[in-house]
Image (spheres, grey):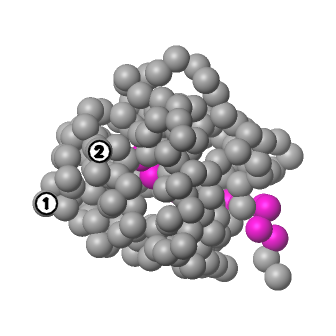
Amino acid sequence: MPNLDNISNLVVIASSTGGPKSLQSVVPKLPANLNAGVIVVQHMPSGFTNSLALRLDELSEIHVQEASEGEIIRNGNVYIAKGGMHLKVHESHHRYYLNLSDEPPREGVRPCANYAYESLCDTSLKSIVCVVMTGMGADGTVGIRNLKNNRSIYTISQDQATSIIYGMPRMVYEAGLTDKVAPLTEIANEIVKKVGVQ
């Protein structure tokens, strides 16, 4: 029986406008035995992310829930950033914990994916997969750049054809930070190819 607490891989998905619908084409395709924990930073106000998590959980083999303060990140689990709160990752004794923060909005949003990405800079994770999906603005670009300056990561950007709003993935791509451009229907496969299953 694998130890789900001792994760070595983490996937962080950033999405905004069109994200809730698009996530239904990605999260339900992730297997329950995914060899990674998954964080989703979807721009949403307080009060809406729990219902999103419940809906995705109903559709998925992998477990999906709204992130809660101090929770251990486990393999085969998806954590949706709580609406109106930033989400960061804290490492302690080779375990990874979720931290919620009410710091001011960044990029005009809270939660902001840049915070989540940057919180991984000093972690000892074996691999980090950054996924940037449909959305307005540029959230994710600065965070991924700062993360990439500190360690090796792999970045997947949703393609223009399947993005409801081709803003966030375009900015990451144009900044030269994208390793793979993928249509919405292939994002889950690309994630599994990078982190594997248990």
Q: Is residue 145 visible?
A: no
Q: Is residue 5 left or right of residue 185?
A: right
Q: What residue type is disc 1 on?
A: Ala
Residue beneath disc 1: 161
* Percent coordinates x, y for residue 125 in the rendering: 66, 52
Inspect the magenta stretch and tell me whether residue 48 lies in it: no
Closer to the camera, 55 or 97?
A: 55
**Which quadrant of the figure contains the C terminus?**
bottom right
- Looking at the rendering, the stretch of residues picked out in magenta corresponds to 3-14
Q: What residue type is disc 2 on?
A: Thr
Q: Mark 1 near mark 2, Cβ–Cβ under 8 Å?
A: no
Q: Is residue 103 above or below residue 185?
A: above
* Percent coordinates x, y for residue 177 in the rendering: 32, 43
Residue beneath disc 2: 17
Q: What is the count of numbered marks?
A: 2
Among the two numbered marks 1 and 2 on one chain, the one whose residue lies closer to the N terminus: 2
Inspect the magenta stretch and tell me whether residue 8 lies in it: yes
At x 59%, y 73%, the residue is 62
Query: Farthest residue toward the right?
Result: 93
* Percent coordinates x, y for residue 136 in the rendering: 25, 37
At x 77%, y 52%, the residue is 72
